[in-house]
Image (tube, helix red, strand yellow):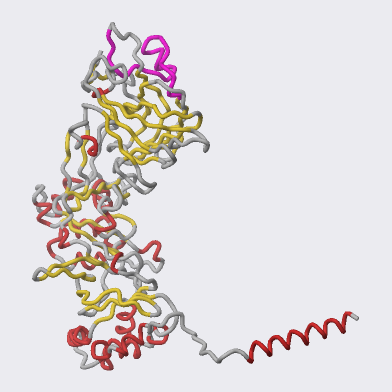
Amino acid sequence: MKYKFARWVFSISLLFIAVYMSGCKKTALRLSTTEDVNVVGYLKKNADSFSLFNLILDRTETSAFLDAYGSYTVFAPTNSGVKTWLSSVNAADVNAADLTVLKELVKFHILADTINTSSFKDGKLPVPTMHGQFLITGVINNGGLSSYTVNRQAAVSKSNVKVGNGIIHVIDQVLVPSKTTIAQQLEARPEYSIFLQAMKETGYYAVLNTVDPDTTKRWKTVIAETNKALADSGIASYNSLKARYSNTGNPADPKDSLNLYVAYHILNGIQFLGDIITSPSHLTLQPQEVITTQLIKQEVVVNEAEFNGRLEPGVLLTRNISDNSATNGVWHSASAHFAAKFRKPTAVYWDLATFPEIVKQTTFYKRGTFTFNKSSQDDRPIKDIDWQVRGENYVRYEYSSSPTSTLHHFAYNNDILTIPLGGGTNTNRAGWIEFTTPPIIKGRYKVWICYRNRNNVIINVFVNGELMQRPVNLQTKYPGGTDAELESLGWKRYTTNNAAYPNPDFTGRLVGTVDIKTTQRHKVRFEAIANTNRDLHFDMIHFIPVTDNQVLPRFAPDGTPVYF
């Protein structure tokens, strides 16, 4: 019975299929995913401009995969550009050119991803070429007309040509990959002879003359100094450089100061200028030492910082002779001599309520209230402060010059930071806020949070992601007792006192001890772990070396340190 039923179902199914097929018209099956031609198809359709590059693709057997499905970006040189390159290598035509060279050349013009001009920044493209090296892009202006450049070798004459398997950018010259290492390129430049000799004597020449097959280890970035930059600092020869820095007499010793000087000029990874400015600091090969970087008036500046109210001018990286690609990385040129400085750990008394964005608000700074709002999580109205977007997500800065205002009158500079924070998920307050510190010299520090105690919210404090040992209840005042008794319990008075207010509501709370491993700016984060409130008032954070006095100085309302 089951067998007969199955045959009946099968017969009915065939009948429906036959009826359906009889009513269908023939349709052409499309195997491609777009109506656009692929890369090779576009080049062939425009043979008057690309016949020579197309011939190179054929001869190198590259046409096959560029005519198939995929996602590529191709920088296609015009016929005139190919002719110029052929002439430079003394080849009569494409067939006369060295095949190995052509294969490397073609790979240098192709990226295995679709990259349009929105990714053309002043620096390297986000993905390497199929050759393995990166391309850099920029903009030039000729006769009032701006155009993109690639590797400082070619101009883009037509961009973002969309084809079935990617994007084509038309360029007026052939792109030629680097054939030499960082060490070889510096050796070919006599104006870097002193720095080069230091590289050789310390052993870093060999490091910078190696192309590691492992691309995760291959790339290096070097900031080289010209002989003139050294001479401006009184260093006229390698011997005078050695006399200034070598403390062991053996520059090859990793602990020798000349060795450390060269190491301080080398970074792991490939960092073009456009990459350098995306991070405020970069770790060097000198152990636990960083260079700091800033973009100041469109110029890349290294190691400019303010320590204890004193500005230390930085060193400019000379743009037009930097971003030099090599087979193992990139090198830049410094306009002046620089080296890592030995600094003793020094206390940082950091006013949270003073930063460029509020100082510019002259109508409100030290005069009233101003609110910074975030429109989204990615929005950064304040460069060095970020906070969670979750409901009532603003940071409010309140200022008052009135000595009778109990909310401000003992605060450092008479201003405070008001932050709404809430623990858990059932709240519309931000769960965290994160600050970027001023530069802190490497060392071991005690960390104090200075606040105006008012409302019951408990926070954890993190420094560079490390949880400090003690949470803080922002409602708690410091208890009574002497300075020594308070310090032993993790409390202190950080503001000056007077007879009218013998126990002011401004409290310093020790949250923990931290090892600052590199001299640079760092991250401090407050995270609410219990309760919620919109009025939490912060004033300062103190980083004080563990061997220093933790109690003094205190601070007067005008910011004056008071030692008594």
State whether residue 208 is above or below residue 32.
Answer: above
Q: Nearer the viewer, residue 184 or 112?
A: 112
Q: Residue at x 34, y 78 (%)?
A: 107
Query: Which quadrant does the C terminus fall into?
Result: top left
State whether residue 447 is above or below residue 313.
Answer: above
Q: Position of residue 135 (x, y in %)?
A: 28, 69
Q: Magenta segment, which residues?
A: 473-498
Q: Is residue 279 magenta?
A: no
Task: Look at the magenta stretch and give its main secondary structure.
Answer: loop
Q: Position of residue 32 (x, y in %)?
A: 46, 83
In the image, taking residue 227 as reference, residue 482 lies left or right, namely right
Q: Is residue 497 magenta?
A: yes
Q: Position of residue 239 (x, y in %)?
A: 14, 52
Query: Which quadrant does the N terminus fall into?
Result: bottom right
Kindly indicate the quadrant of the structure image that contains residue 53: bottom left
The image shows a total of numbered marks equal to: 0
Q: Nearer the viewer, residue 501 or 233?
A: 501
Kindly indicate the quadrant of the structure image that contains residue 271: bottom left
Q: Is residue 348 visible?
A: no
Q: Nearer the viewer, residue 122 or 340?
A: 122
State whether residue 311 is above or below residue 102.
Answer: above
Q: Residue at x 37, y 9 (%)?
A: 482
